[in-house]
């Protein structure tokens, strides 16, 4: 394999940076992965069509890359063109009751949350401290502590790789659901370029999540800063610090089952909490199963292990290999099915050497 090389190509008034054989361990939070055949970094969305032409010329698939916080890359590398936006503009149109916030996809998600909290705009504070970019947040429809990205999204701007055109999706056409969207379902067809949010200028604290309800029980006038501080503290207590461990956060999705199946599983495991979803189905708390049914906290495969404070999370020590993470995930999925007959799937996107899949 050739060593990493960098070249720059002029497009319009900007520079498109094209790097070859970039270790994916350097651009993903799991810190695993061999070389990406190409990594193209753009600071202007107008350069996207030129980047797509590079992939076409090289006869390689395109993979949009945000902050690398939801990807597990193979040690042998991936023969693909990764396209990363480093666009950082945020603009605001103040209206009577809302702030219409337009954010480039390359903005770090928590930077946007921090700005909204500082300005007094309500709606995304419960999503504090989630790693990644604004664009990737739309693909995944990130959610936490009683809130989801889709609660506040107005429109999503994308580049359609198949049709070679820029498009705008209203939120109603984004097929948002539990950790999914049209941008995730139609794999690698769209590169998200910007989002428009409608954030409330009136106080609307969302304390539906149990830990937040307990934290602020009996308190009036809970501020944005209060909620953000509480959410960050909760996350710090449950997730491994990226300064010490590799991780992509929650590795597995909480399974969604039918109401009929939820009655059956409640009979088998009476203490299991269940959460009906507004779009239908019932969410099963997988962490509860891993902890209370299977006692898997701390389960290890080489340098990969389930995080003690939150067994949905796979963490890695320095030098962990992709196959150790996959082996651990497979063993967990097997034991869950053996005990509960529930099939679980990764939330993390797993890239293969020759097959690129979710």
Image: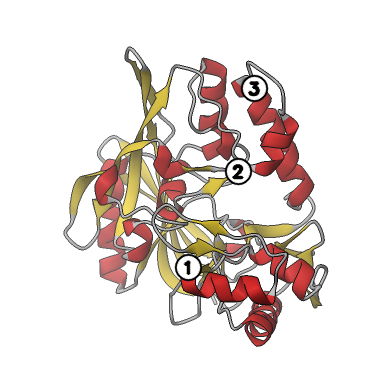
Which marked residue is nearer to the observer: mark 2 or mark 1? 1
Please indicate whether residue 35 sits to the left or right of residue 195 in the image.
Answer: right
In the depicted structure, whether residue 119 falls above or below residue 281: above
Whether residue 64 is visible, yes or no, is yes
User: In what element is the residue under mark 2?
Assistant: loop
Residue 340 point in image, percent of width and height:
64, 81
Circles 2 and 1 in contact, beta carbons < 8 Å: no
In the depicted structure, whether residue 151 falls above or below residue 178: above
Please report the residue visible at 52 percent of the width from the left and 38 percent of the height from the top. Answer: 108
* Residue that badge 2 annotates: 145
Please indicate whether residue 34 sits to the left or right of residue 161 in the image.
Answer: right
Q: Residue furthest top?
A: 96
When asked about the image quadrant of residue 64, the answer is bottom left
Label whose residue precedes the other's in the sequence (2 or 1)? 2
Please report the residue visible at 58 percent of the width from the left and 55 percent of the height from the top. Answer: 69
Q: Quadrant of the N terminus?
A: bottom right
User: In what element is the residue under mark 3?
Assistant: helix
Badge 3 crowding class, 10 Å Cα cut-off, few under 14, some 14 to 19, many 20 or more, is some
Whether residue 313 is visible, yes or no, is no
Which marked residue is nearer to the observer: mark 3 or mark 2? 2
Residue 260 point in image, percent of width and height:
48, 73
Q: How is the image coloured?
A: secondary structure
Residue 343 point in image, percent of width and height:
55, 79
Label whose residue precedes the other's in the sequence (3 or 2)? 2
Please report the residue visible at 62 percent of the width from the left and 19 percent of the height from the top. Answer: 223
Q: Residue 259 — which label?
A: 1
Badge 1 crowding class, 10 Å Cα cut-off, few under 14, some 14 to 19, many 20 or more, is some
* Residue that badge 3 annotates: 225
Marks 2/1: CA–CA distance: 23 Å
Marks 3/1: CA–CA distance: 37 Å
Marks 3/2: CA–CA distance: 15 Å
């Amino acid at each position: 394999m050739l060593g990493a090389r960098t070249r720059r190509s002029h497009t319009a008034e900007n520079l498109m940076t094209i790097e070859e054989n970039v270790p994916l361990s350097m651009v993903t939070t799991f810190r695993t992965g061999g070389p990406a055949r190409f990594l193209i970094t753009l600071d202007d969305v107008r350069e996207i069509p030129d980047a797509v032409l590079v992939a076409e010329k090289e006869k390689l698939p395109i993979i949009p890359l945000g902050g690398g916080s939801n990807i597990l890359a193979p040690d042998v590398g991936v023969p693909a063109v990764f396209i990363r936006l480093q666009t950082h503009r945020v603009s605001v149109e103040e209206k009577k009751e809302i702030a219409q916030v337009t954010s480039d996809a390359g903005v770090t998600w928590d930077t946007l949350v921090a700005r909204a909290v500082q300005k007094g705009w309500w709606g995304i504070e419960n999503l504090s401290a989630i790693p990644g970019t604004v664009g990737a947040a739309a693909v995944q429809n990130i959610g936490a502590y009683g809130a989801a990205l889709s609660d506040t999204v107005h429109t999503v701007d994308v580049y359609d790789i198949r049709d070679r055109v820029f498009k705008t999706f209203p939120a109603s056409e984004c097929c948002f659901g539990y950790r999914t969207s049209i941008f995730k379902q139609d794999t690698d067809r769209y590169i998200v370029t910007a989002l428009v949010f409608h954030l409330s200028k009136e106080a609307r604290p969302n304390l539906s999540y149990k830990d937040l309800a307990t934290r602020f029980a009996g308190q009036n006038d809970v501020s944005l800063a209060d909620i953000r501080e509480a959410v960050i503290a909760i996350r710090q207590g449950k997730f491994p610090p990226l300064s010490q461990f590799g991780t992509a956060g929650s590795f597995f999705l909480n399974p969604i089952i039918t109401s009929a199946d939820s009655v059956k599983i409640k009979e088998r495991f009476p203490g299991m909490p269940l959460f009906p979803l507004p779009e239908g189905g019932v969410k099963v708390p997988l962490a509860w199963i891993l902890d209370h049914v299977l006692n898997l906290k701390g389960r290890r495969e080489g340098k990969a292990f389930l995080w003690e404070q939150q067994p949905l999370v796979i963490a890695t020590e320095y030098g962990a290999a992709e196959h150790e993470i996959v082996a651990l995930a497979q063993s967990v999925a097997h034991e869950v099915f053996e005990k509960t007959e529930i099939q679980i799937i990764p939330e993390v996107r797993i890239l293969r050497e020759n097959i690129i899949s979710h």
